[in-house]
Amino acid sequence: MAFDSFDYSGMLRPGLPPAAARWNGFPKYNFVGGHNDADSVPVDGLIAAAASVLKREGKTLATYGLESGALGYRPLREFIAGKLARDTGIECSVDEILITSGSLQGLDLVNQVLLSPGDTVIMEQMTYSGSITRVKRLGAEIIGVPTDHDGMSAAGLASALEDLRRRGVKPKYIYTIPTVQNPTATVMSEARRAELLELSRTYAVPIFEDECYADLTWDGKRPRALRAMADCDRVVHIGSFSKSIAPALRIGYLVAGWPLMSRILGIKSDGGSGALEQMVLAEYCRDHFDAHVRTLRQTLRRKLDTLIEALRMQFGDAAELEYPAGGIFLWVKLPDVVDTSRLYQVALGAGVAINPGAEWMTDAASGKSRLRLCFAHPSEQIIREGVGVLADVCRREFGLPHPPAAAHR
Ligand SMILES: Cc1ncc(COP(=O)(O)O)c(C=O)c1O
């Protein structure tokens, strides 16, 4: 039965974000968001894991938090602790790991305990739009630091920190995505990490390290985490299973020492993140995570190569890009005449969804001619076709790129 509508407009809290649009299904050529390769979801493995863990421990679902307390399902925290020690150098106890509903909840929790309106946060100039919007929504100011092939520029960070110090402003944290940065997909070297840590120590500003993509470097290797290299509990670390297993599971984690963790737990009043997802992940990952991620990386890299080949064919030199070190995104610069926010709207009408660059920059104007393409979800054929449609739309709207020498669609 449909209710008559009721007018809530006069009652809404001031400062809410814009109303959401209704979901009308995915566009045919879907290059947005962080969706993963559908055929790589380990469905059979997850079914077997669900059956075995539920048979053994299903009755613990009767309690909030299973029998593991507010930090989350203990076997999953044990798996994460082992993996962090092996892959990142972070040595932590299971009591320094909090399971979150995706790493987005980790971002929210850290922001909620640290940020007030008027605060300042430092970030890479090109960074994750979800982090930018969250900080802005809380009324905090963002200072963007330039990046290079090595990630956040240490000289840029030093000058931002010094400038803020002169103005009497103490930033709340330095947010960075060091390993497979979003959107640039670079990996910060250990030398650069050491420089950032030294600046964090000198200015007594914590680092907030977001490692959502760190499992997806092409060679499977990664530098030590900033948290592992820090001399004290000055780095908060978050990670996720969204990119390595599946984003819809909504399971991430946060690593922090007890003084901060205890404050975060004070506001994580959701009764615990999804218990079944935690149980199934712990059961599956214990024996299968490494092999699964090895295969996933190969699939993702094949799709990346298809995307780059299609861009070369359709856009030629008009598309500037750097080969990603891993992950699921390609960050592309088109000629200055192209406004990708406009391209986004027109392309959507033709069934192609792209992320316009302005949303991935702390200074939106500098992203005007950039776009981010997620290559993980579409098939290779859809990638080829979609890039062709995008090129046609772009040509009609902006006169570029010039038609390809050999049409190939
Ligand atoms: C850098 C970064 N952090 C956090 C997230 C949130 O991921 P999730 O909540 O799915 O773990 C994303 C998603 O794309 C991301 O790119």
Image (spheres, rainbow, N blue to C red):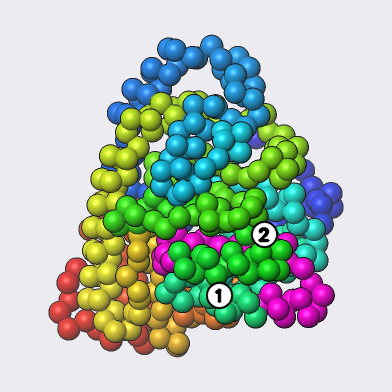
| Residue 251 located left or right of residue 43 | right
Mark linked to residue 154:
1
| Residue 372 located left or right of residue 311 | right
Question: Can residue 397 be seen at all in this image of the molecule?
Answer: no
| Residue 367 located left or right of residue 384 | right
Q: Residue at x 39, y 50 (%)?
A: 215
How many numbered discs sit on the rendered protein?
2
N-terminal label among 2 and 1: 1
Q: Position of residue 380 (x, y in %)?
A: 24, 57
Which element type, helix, strand or loop, lies under badge 1?
Answer: helix
Question: Would you identify the image quadrant in which residue 155 lies?
Answer: bottom right
Q: Is residue 383 above or below residue 146?
A: above
Which contiguous range is marked in magenta? Answer: 160-189
Give the main secondary structure of the magenta stretch.
loop
Q: Dot 1, crowdedness within 10 Å: few (<14), some or many (≥20)? A: many
Q: Position of residue 104 (x, y in %)?
A: 58, 49
Mark 1, ligand 1, within 8 Å: the answer is: no
Question: Would you identify the image quadrant in which residue 48 lies?
Answer: top left
Residue named by callout 2:
206
Q: Residue at x 47, y 68 (%)?
A: 191
Q: Residue at x 35, y 74 (%)?
A: 322
Q: CA distance from mark 2 to mark 1?
A: 15 Å
Q: Position of residue 29 (x, y in %)?
A: 35, 59
Instruction: Tell me, yes or no, whether the highlighted magenta stretch contains residue 173.
Output: yes
The C terminus lies in quadrant: bottom left
| Residue 380 located left or right of residue 240 | left
Q: Is residue 138 above or below residue 112?
A: below
